Image (spheres, rainbow, N blue to C red):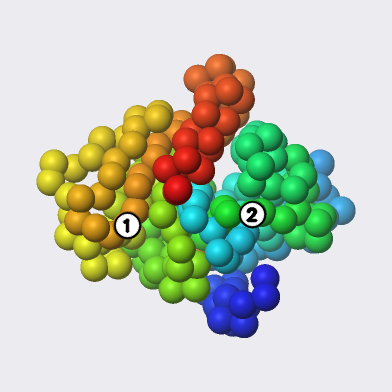
Amino acid sequence: MSDPGLTALEAEVTTCRRCPRLVDWREQVAREKRAAFKDDTYWGRPIPGFGDPAARVLILGLAPAAHGANRTGRVFTGDRSGDFLFAALHRTGFANQPTSVSRDDGLQLTDAWITAAVRCAPPANKPTPTERDTCLPWTVAELDHVKHVRVVVCLGAFAWDAALRLRAALGHPPPRPRPKFGHGALWYDDDNSGWVLLGTYHPSQQNTFTGVLTEAMLDDVLRTAREVAG
Ligand code: SF4
């Protein structure tokens, strides 16, 4: 990350303690660990966004996984959801390699920036609405540096909702009627914010192991994102 503003923001976000429940949980998980990772030093802090600061495609997830990003310190890194997502990003030309295992594994993204609506691992993967709203300003601040976003790929309904809230936080009135989430849903902003929302099912094991979300489906969404971004 070469933008000094982003580096400073990363330093700030990774020390955030605004949500007491999530601070307790992320640190408890980091202390107790999963047996398979008992020799790892868990990150146990908030997860900053990652990718290409010149990105036109913003990929918005829900929150870090307890033993994935909360362990490795990079968004979607070190868990099955991330394995599925980064393999797709590589197939579609957004990533230089198909795997993402640690912060120093050489992964680079082109034209994509990945972040999560909530930056600390929540119990049961379920942040509260208050935690979502408390964390939103960090994404607003990030987008002050990632200025060329045209398409927001929303990984699941929670991220779709968060994208609409993010848009409102950036000063655009809520659209009426409210656009509905769905896999492949496309919403072109008629308020000229310059954003297009694109929905996809979340690449969670629950979806990928059951065939609800296949590799081809996610690849299609990512290719559409590139086309729409122009
Ligand atoms: Fe801070 Fe966001 Fe983590 Fe809450 S979820 S403690 S706002 S980084």
Q: Position of residue 93 (x, y in %)?
A: 66, 42
Can you tell which quarter of the image residue 92 is in?
Answer: top right
Which residue, as the protein is rendered here, is positioned at the far front? Answer: 230
Q: Is mark 1 within 8 Å of ligand 1?
A: no
> Quick check: 34 left or right of 172?
right
Q: State the residue at coordinates (45%, 48%).
A: 230
SS of the residue under disc 1: loop
Seen from the viewer's position, the closer of residues 192 and 33 is: 192
Number of marks present in the image shown:
2
- Check the image and report above or below for 11 versus 82: below
Q: Position of residue 24 (x, y in %)?
A: 55, 63
Q: Position of residue 140 (x, y in %)?
A: 40, 68
Seen from the viewer's position, the closer of residues 62 and 92 is: 92
Can you tell which quarter of the image residue 13 is in?
Answer: bottom right
Q: Which residue is mark 2?
A: 110
- Check the image and report above or below for 46 versus 189: below
Q: State the residue at coordinates (24%, 68%).
A: 171
Which corner quadrant holds the N terminus?
Answer: bottom right
Q: State the residue at coordinates (20%, 50%).
A: 190
Q: Which residue is mark 1?
A: 194
